[in-house]
Amino acid sequence: MKDYEITIKKASEVTIFATDNDTLVFPSKVTFESSHDAAEILIDGLENTTIGIPPQADHIELSVENATVNLKGISYSRIEIDGKGKLRINTDTLSGNIDINMISGEAELIVPAGAKFSTRSEGKNNTINCPVPTDPNAQVTIELNGKNSTLSIRS
């Protein structure tokens, strides 16, 4: 599988890590559907959630609200985070584009020191605060979409 659509409800901390043997790891309280190269995962009611996916993903779509999200060892072409409320996102690698989609929300993204990326803000009344140096020629773009939202990026 290369595409993952993950919806997590009522969790305060979410960790998505790369497995080392092309397996999926998720809690027993989960709704799981798969077809071809895509998986849909729904987790509801677990305060701390840990999910393992193979280390090479094309597209990851994560829907989460008021949570800390930890991304560990995952390589992706694109990760899309649909968030509500306040999010804190920690990632140990920037291998592909990151889209953060919010309406009237606040997100903090912690990137690895020395990571090369550019930023883009789309939508209405969105603000990106980024004291970390950016590179307009970088292959990775961090984008904030939505309305009335703020993204702070730091390393």
Image (cartoon, grey):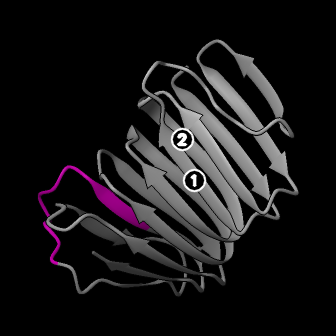
Mark number for residue 104? none
Q: Is residue 29 left or right of residue 149?
A: right
Q: Is residue 121 left or right of residue 81?
A: left
Q: Nearer the viewer, residue 143 or 95?
A: 95
Q: Nearer the viewer, residue 47 or 119?
A: 47
Residue 152, position as x, y percentages in the image: 41, 83
Q: Is residue 118 above or below residue 95?
A: below
Residue 102, position as x, y percentages in the image: 62, 72
Q: How crowded is the residue under tag 2: few (<14 C-alpha within 10 Å), some, or many (20+)? A: many
Q: CA distance from mark 1 to mark 2?
A: 13 Å
**Residue 117 placement: quadrant:** bottom left
Secondary structure, mark 1, is strand
Residue at 51% from the left image edge and 24% from the top image edge? 2
Secondary structure, mark 2, is strand
Image quadrant holding the N terminus, namely top right
Residue at 58% from the left image edge and 17% from the top image edge? 37
Amino acid of disc 1? Thr
Residue at 45% from the left image edge and 31% from the top image edge? 57
Q: Is residue 85 left or right of residue 118?
A: right
Residue at 50% from the left image edge and 83% from the top image edge? 126
Q: Is residue 124 above or below residue 137?
A: below
Q: How crowded is the residue under tag 1: few (<14 C-alpha within 10 Å), some, or many (20+)? A: some
Amino acid of disc 2? Ile
Label 2: which residue? 60
Q: Which residues are magenta?
A: 133-143
Q: Is residue 27 left or right of residue 2?
A: right
Q: Nearer the viewer, residue 63 or 102?
A: 63
Label 1: which residue? 15
